[in-house]
């Protein structure tokens, strides 16, 4: 078996290269799924936060405008409080930030695994590259322990992003000059 540069790989190096590819793929999917989860939490924050703010403002204006509208103002204030309570309980802003941070951590792992496989593996001592693999695996495992599991929608949308080329780079596509050679 040959690596991406065309050099022949020994059995152990081939196994490390395969494992680095698995790590890249795992991190790639995890990152995209967490980005989708962050988008969902951002949306939830807006869906709950905006009505809470608007209802509070309208309730205050209604109460000040006419004393006979106290019932309407009270109902609006209660609705605003309910939206605020749900927003506080769900904690969408915090979850959005956590999902974004997790996604970026997975991207770091993905990049480091790809660089280890493509750049370091061919020339690095086998024990050194094995240590790199172990360190990257430990980082991924630690991230997996702390991240909130994604919902089904985030999983499907993240996977679709990848299938649609959301993780592809132009440099990895054969250029016109490469195809003509």
Image (cartoon, rainbow, N blue to C red):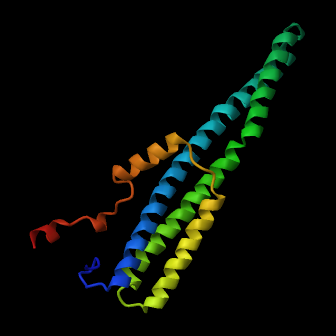
Quarter location, residue 98: bottom right
Question: Residue at the top extreme?
Answer: 68
Vertical arrangement, residue 106 with respect to residue 112, above or below: above
Vertical arrangement, residue 180 with respect to residue 87, above or below: below
Question: Residue at the left extreme?
Answer: 180
List x then y, in percent, for residue 38.
58, 48
Q: Residue at x 66, y 48 (%)?
A: 95
Q: Is residue 50 left or right of residue 68?
A: left
Vertical arrangement, residue 157 with respect to residue 4, above or below: above
List x then y, in percent, for residue 171.
30, 68
Q: Residue at x 48, y 53 (%)?
A: 32
Q: Is residue 75 left or right of residue 27?
A: right
Quarter location, residue 87: top right
Give the camera-side residue of 46 and 163: 163
Give the camera-side residue of 103 and 59: 103
Question: Residue at the right extreme?
Answer: 67
Quadrant occupied by the C terminus? bottom left
Q: Is residue 88 left or right of residue 169?
A: right
Q: Residue at x 57, y 64 (%)?
A: 105
Vertical arrangement, residue 73 with respect to residue 125, above or below: above
Give the camera-side residue of 44 and 50: 44
Question: Residue at the front extreme?
Answer: 11
Q: Residue at x 34, y 79 (%)?
A: 14
Count every numbered label the image shows and give the total: 0
Quadrant occupied by the N terminus? bottom left
List x then y, in percent, for residue 4.
28, 76
């Amino acid at each position: 078996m040959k690596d991406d540069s065309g050099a022949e790989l020994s059995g152990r190096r081939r196994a490390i290269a395969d494992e680095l590819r698995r790590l890249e793929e795992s991190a790639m999917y995890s990152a995209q799924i967490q980005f989708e989860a962050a988008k969902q939490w951002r949306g939830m924050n807006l869906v709950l936060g905006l009505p809470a703010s608007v209802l509070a403002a309208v309730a205050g204006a209604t109460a000040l405008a006419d004393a006979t509208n106290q019932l309407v103002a009270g109902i609006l204030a209660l609705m605003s409080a309910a939206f605020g309570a749900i927003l506080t309980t769900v904690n969408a802003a915090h979850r959005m930030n956590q999902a974004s941070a997790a996604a970026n951590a997975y991207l770091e792992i993905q990049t480091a695994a790809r660089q280890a496989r493509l750049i370091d593996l061919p020339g690095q001592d086998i024990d050194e590259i094995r240590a790199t693999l172990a360190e990257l695996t430990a980082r991924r495992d630690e991230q997996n322990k702390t991240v909130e599991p994604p919902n089904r929608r985030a999983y499907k949308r993240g996977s679709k992003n990848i299938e649609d080329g959301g993780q592809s780079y132009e440099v990895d596509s054969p250029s016109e000059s490469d195809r003509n050679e």
